[in-house]
Image (spheres, helix red, strand yellow):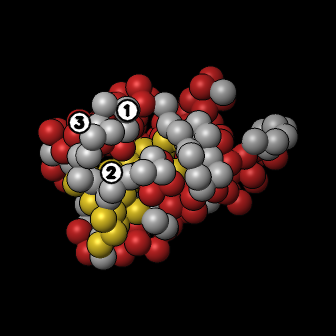
């Protein structure tokens, strides 16, 4: 998939929307069976270098509330859940991710949904955004954030409860 991604980017293909990507893939004679994954991979590849050059203090990291453990003590506020660093910090991926991201300078938010993400972005006007979510939510965000460099990290297990993410992948993007 990486070679295809690079080929499409090199050709200057338009993938600003899923519809544009489908058109490009049809033109290349490629059947878009897994268009959502390819769309996010293309967006990530396109913005990767720009994203890296932006200071973490100018970036926001969004984490999905569904990544929280069942006994999570985080408190819901107007800007999402606030991690309390409870006794689960050795096993909680949210705690590990937030701890690393905030040490780097990121603003972090544990959000219950996409509308909160958009409200926070509109208010804080970051120069770049990284987000962890299910594929459907990543695509919706990527379609909405056309003028901001993004990095999307797909949950390895989704379903709105007991979800999971590749911690190493997240930390590498940070």
Q: Determine the CA span between mark 2 and mark 1.
A: 20 Å
Which is more foreground, mark 1 or mark 3?
1
- Dot 1 or dot 3: first in sequence order is 1
Return the residue at label 1: 91
Q: Nearer the viewer, residue 140 or 114?
A: 114
Neighbour tally class for label 3: few under 14, some 14-19, many 20 plus, Cα within 10 Å: some
Q: Determine the CA span between mark 1 and mark 3.
A: 14 Å
Task: Identify the mark at residue 61; answer none if there is no mark.
Answer: 2
Return the residue at label 3: 100
Indicate the quadrant containing the C terminus: top left, top right, bottom left or bottom right.
top left
Indicate the quadrant containing the N terminus: top left, top right, bottom left or bottom right.
top right
In this image, 46 relative to 17: left or right? Answer: left
Q: Is residue 108 visible?
A: no
In the displayed structure, 131 sits above or below 96; it is: below
Q: Nearer the viewer, residue 151 or 100?
A: 100
Which is more foreground, mark 2 or mark 1?
1
Residue at x 57% of width, y 29% of height: 6
- Residue 107 position in % (x across, y down): 22, 54
């Amino acid at each position: 998939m990486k070679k295809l991604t690079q080929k499409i980017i090199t050709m200057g293909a338009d993938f600003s929307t899923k519809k544009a990507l489908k058109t490009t893939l049809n033109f290349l004679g490629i059947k878009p069976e897994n268009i959502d994954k390819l769309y996010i991979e293309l967006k990530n590849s396109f913005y990767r270098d720009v994203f890296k050059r932006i200071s973490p203090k100018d970036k926001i990291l969004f984490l999905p509330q569904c990544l929280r453990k069942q006994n999570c003590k985080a408190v819901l506020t107007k800007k999402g859940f606030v991690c309390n660093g409870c006794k689960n910090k050795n096993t909680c991926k949210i705690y590990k991710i937030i701890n690393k991201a905030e040490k780097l300078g990121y603003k972090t938010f544990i959000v219950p949904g996409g509308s909160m993400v958009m409200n926070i972005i509109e208010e804080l006007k970051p120069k770049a955004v990284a987000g962890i979510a299910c594929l459907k939510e990543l695509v919706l965000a990527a379609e909405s954030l056309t003028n901001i460099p993004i990095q999307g990290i797909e949950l390895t297990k989704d379903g709105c409860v007991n979800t999971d993410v590749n911690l190493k992948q997240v930390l590498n993007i940070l």
